[in-house]
Amino acid sequence: MQWIDSESYFEVLPPKQFNFDACLVYLDRSNLEVLHQITDSSIYKVISETLCKVTSVNHRIKIEFPMGVPPAAERKKVAQYIWEWFDLEQNLEGFYQLASQDKILKPLVEKYYGLRIVCIPDLFEAFVWAITGQQINLTFAYTLKKRLIEKFGEYVIFEGKQFWQFPTAGKIADLTVEDLKQLQFTTRKAEYIINIAREIVNGNLSKEKLLEMKDIEKSLTSIRGIGAWSANYVMMRCLHQSAAFPITDVGLHNALKALLHLEEKPTINQIEAYAANWQGWQGYATFYLWRSLYGEKI
């Protein structure tokens, strides 16, 4: 991690292949999002219990503290979160080299150069988002997430606005299935989420343990409620596995159908053929394909 702490604020120094505005478009894709607010190209988000204002100045990510400057140890935690949130440890040279030779990815990387996978650093949040999104449309998934956060999360108030934090695993571990069903989670999803919260609280499940596993996907799919799509989603968005490939993802299918002007969504066999040259970078290919679905079109 590269950063400069100026005490009243700090700056994170991203690699050259980073486009803050491209990531901002991704973060601004739903008006149901409550974990951050975007105003005038600035992101307001509670990180490590501190309200942060995140902007880009001269290719540096500047973090300011509207409600007061936290201690040095907290500032470092925030910097680490930002570094992980924007996947800044990842060297994209290999991806861009590969993409420049690929007919599907080439126009995408030219248009969205510097876009990085916007990650979910908190493992529990990543699991909940993966489970919530199973077999429902994105709008309803956001609606459920918003209900969960506003019912069980904490918030700070600044200038009359609420800035929410995702509920902790500890908070959700104490709930009953009925508590989540009242928010319109299915019985199964409620069971899965509460079970995972309890596994995290008792120390059986952590990012560190998962990253030590020889076969991360197999370890994830051994968890009740986590199939191949959810496992690859968590690997891609939380565990920084650039080769993770949620191949059954509806958004991926829709993006390929639109970009290739297909009459029907591609089959899994077709997608495997398209992705034959994406080895090691399937996660980034997927993220760039998702990006083609919203905002300005190619």
Image (cartoon, helix red, strand yellow):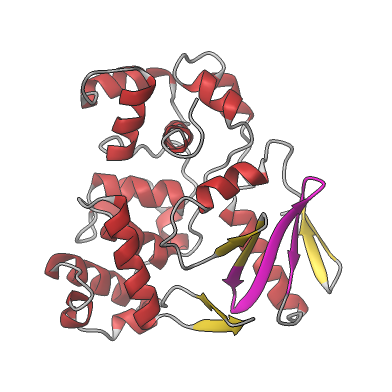
Residue 104 in which image quadrant:
top left
Is residue 98 visible in the rendered structure shown here? yes
Tell me the magenta residue range.
Answer: 45-65
The structure residue drawn at horizontal position 56% and vertical position 64%, both measured from the top left corner, is 37
Answer left or right for 228 relative to 232: left
Which residue appears farthest toward the right when viewing the image?
6
Look at the image and tell me in which quarter the N terminus lies: bottom right
Q: Position of residue 111 (x, y in %)?
A: 58, 27
Q: Position of residue 212 (x, y in %)?
A: 44, 54
The structure residue drawn at horizontal position 39% and vertical position 67%, both measured from the top left corner, is 124
Q: Position of residue 298 (x, y in %)?
A: 50, 25
The structure residue drawn at horizontal position 25% and vertical position 84%, both measured from the top left corner, is 175
Answer left or right for 115 relative to 102: right
Is 64 colored magenta in this rendering? Answer: yes
Which residue appears farthest toward the left when viewing the image?
187
Position of residue 84 relative to residue 96, above or below, is below
Is residue 118 visible in the rendered structure shown here? no
